[in-house]
Image (cartoon, rainbow, N blue to C red):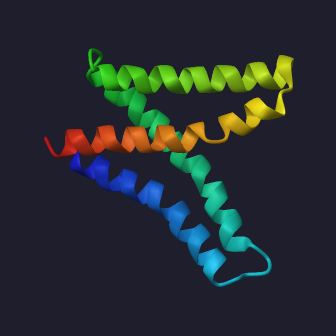
Amino acid sequence: MKNINYLNYFFVGIPIVLILFGYLTNQSSGNLIGCGLLFTILTGLFQIVIGAKMLIDEPNDKMLQAYIISVILFFTIWVFNGLILYSDILYFILLFIPPMLAIYLTIIIHKKANK
């Protein structure tokens, strides 16, 4: 679990470092910021896979169940809004959900690694 914890820190930290470094260097092309934003896709994929695997290993863990339900709810609302509602306000609200989910799973992994 400690290795998963360190790997999670890597996947969460790299986009932050790239975006901050791109911002601080005042790069006109925005390559570092763009790479940091694209790396968040890998971060989300990693966290969804790890969260699902942890839930398979511990199916009675309420925190992991809440995480997976939140992920499924996020994608359901995102697709529903894209196909039916077309609400810009809802898209704006959905923008803040993935970082909160990433922080939540990071807390879960940290607690399990330091048990």
Image-based side of 96 in relation to 111, left or right: right
Q: As displayed, is residue 23 above or below residue 104?
A: below
Q: As displayed, is residue 102 above or below residue 85?
A: below
Q: Quadrant of residue 30?
A: bottom right
Q: As displayed, is residue 26 above or below residue 108?
A: below
* Residue depicted at x 85% and y 17%: 84
* Residue depicted at x 72% and y 72%: 31
Where does the image place residue 106, in percent across and percent down from the top left? Answer: 37, 44
* Residue depicted at x 51% and y 69%: 17
Image quadrant holding the C terminus, namely: top left
Image-based side of 106 in relation to 94, left or right: left
Identify the residue at the far left of this view.
115
38 and 62: which is toward the camera: 62
* Residue depicted at x 65% and y 75%: 23
Where does the image place residue 70, in percent across and percent down from the top left? Answer: 51, 24
Image quadrant holding the N terminus, namely: top left
Q: As displayed, is residue 53 above or below residue 110?
A: above
Where does the image place residue 40, in percent across and percent down from the top left? Answer: 59, 52
